[in-house]
Amino acid sequence: MTTTTPQPVATSHKRRRRHLLARTIAATALAAATIGLGAGTASAMPNCVTLARAIDMMTRAAELSRQAGYDDVARQRAETALYYQSLYDGHCLA
């Protein structure tokens, strides 16, 4: 008779906490990118520091999602970070 050991609660709890933290960071990164691109302002001048911070946050969210086992979500967040990077390159390095 083969028995399986259940997954420790702590591991499951840590995984869920990482996923929730990644979601929060990703939402904050989206807001920062929106502000960084000057959306809703009269000047529509990009704020490069805020946009760079959005890139860092989305990259961190992707890493946390990967650690939590959400590979598809991590891949999407990494692609979003690359998109933000292309916006940064176009607006701030031009």
Image: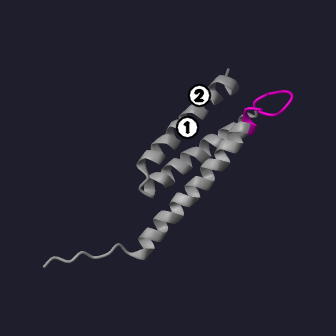
Say which of marks 2 and 1 sits in front.
1
Q: Who's the residue at 55% across and 49% down the image?
A: 60
Q: Who's the residue at 86% across and 28% down the image?
A: 42
Q: Who's the residue at 13% across and 79% down the image?
A: 1
Q: Who's the residue at 58% across and 53% down the image?
A: 23
Disc 1 target residue:
80
Residue 49 shows in this picture: no
Secondary structure of the residue carrying numbered label 1: helix
User: The magenta stretch spans which residues?
Assistant: 35-46
Residue 68, x across and y down, in percent: 45, 58
Disc 2 target residue:
86
Residue 5, x across and y down, in percent: 28, 76
Magenta stretch, overall SS: loop
**Residue 45 located within the stretch drawn in magenta:** yes
Q: Residues within 10 Å of mark 1 (few under 14, many from 20)?
A: some
Q: Viewed as shown, does residue 21 lie left or right of 7?
A: right
Secondary structure of the residue carrying numbered label 2: helix
First-in-chain label (2 vs 1) = 1
